Image (spheres, rainbow, N blue to C red):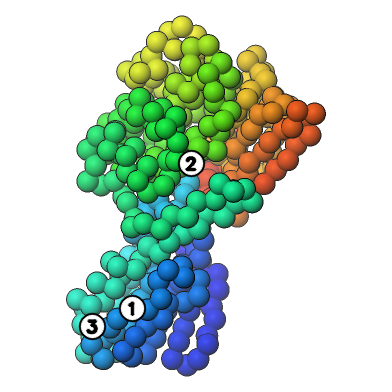
Amino acid sequence: MSVTQISSASASSLTLALAFGCRYCAPPLELCLNRPSSRRRLPAALPSSITTIPSASRTTATFVSFLPRFLDPHFVTGNCLLFKMEFQGILVRVVCVVYFMLVYFPWSMQTFDYEIQRHTCPSVLINGPTSEAVKLNKRFWTGSGIGTNKEMVDSLHNYGVIRSKKVSEAMESIDRGFFVPDGTPPYVDTPMPIGYNATISAPHMHATCLQLLEKHLQPGMHALDVGSGTGYLTACFAMMVGPEGRAVGVEHIPELVVSSMENIKKSAAAPLLKEGSLSVHVGDGRQGWAQCAPYDAIHVGAAAAEIPPALIEQLKPGGRMVIPVGSVFQDLKVVDKDADGSVNIHDETSVRYVPLTSREAQLRDN
């Protein structure tokens, strides 16, 4: 966790912007410490739909909005492990509780907890230069109480992450439960470790990428999934392009390729794997997979320092690639190749991913 901005409007007000750096989308978090009064106005960074917060009493009505729920898909995107963020979040919460108990004693802990639960997940506008920017203005969802794949998809749809019937059908047909490690809750909206310093992304991130690529995943089209991992997104691609299309996964860890094929065999995409319209290969994803190129859709599941030229070359005119780019600060970039071969790139949102690197570098600390 890093403190990115500190500004003070007066001696009685402090705004502290925090950002987490653990492979998550990291917009600033704001902590507002105000003196007690009868009403509390939110900081300007929060949505205009929320104006004031009534206080429980004249002596305990300090508004605090600084920490999202750790698994909130509307605040975070990406596919990072959560234990670092949870640890940092707990530390921040403990420090703030102690601070308020000392400065504002006597303090109503019930009111404090209520304010956190009510306001820790403000609306987040995922800004993009296209008209597809999505305003996520509902309560956070962690999926912790969801027990089926369909319930997970319905929740993503209800919260505006899934916006099309085609994406919804693809994610309903491929049960995520077949693609997560044994003993882990499959439908919680969080990334999960799958070994070899790799993870399976959170469901909301898979849904986001499928939405961005939907028009390029029509029946008969070709799709490439770089860093295919467990094979989940590759299987979703295969369901969307159908048996007349081609879905290819590339993963440089042989053991993950073997396990991903076993996962796919348990899923609704098994016939496509058997027929050959779906395949997973061992290879360096930075070089793509030229045998089945060009591709209408390319997804990259790790952050590149720059967009690999081989992937741009293998992108079909009229096609689209979604790839995180950057090192410390990363952006999910949408790369569109026009019919004449020219390339247009725009940023969709900020993300945090593991680096797109060699097999040796990825396994160095494993």
Instruction: Give the structural element (helix, strand or loop) at label 2.
Output: helix
- Above or below, comparing residue 178 to residue 120 in the picture: above
- Residue that label 3 marks: 56
Q: CA distance from mark 3 to mark 2?
A: 39 Å
Q: Are marks 1 and 2 in contact (CB under 8 Å)?
A: no
Residue in the picture at 72% in, 26% down: 317
Question: Badge 1, how many Cα within 10 Å: few under 14, some, many 20+?
Answer: some
Image coords of residue 4 (percent x, y)? 55, 69
Placement of 226 over or under 105, stated as above or below: above
The first of marks 1 and 2 along the sequence is: 1
Mark 1 → mark 2, Cα distance in angstroms: 32 Å
Side (left or right) of 13 relative to 156: right
Q: Residue 100 appears in which quarter of the rendering? A: bottom left
How many numbered discs, if any? Answer: 3
81 to 167, vertically: above or below: below
- Image height of 131 relative to 150, above or below: below
- Can the viewer see residue 99 in this picture? no
Contact (Cβ within 8 Å) of mark 3 with mark 1: no
Residue receiving disc 1? 53
Q: Which residue is the site of mark 2?
A: 208
> SS class of the residue under badge 3?
loop
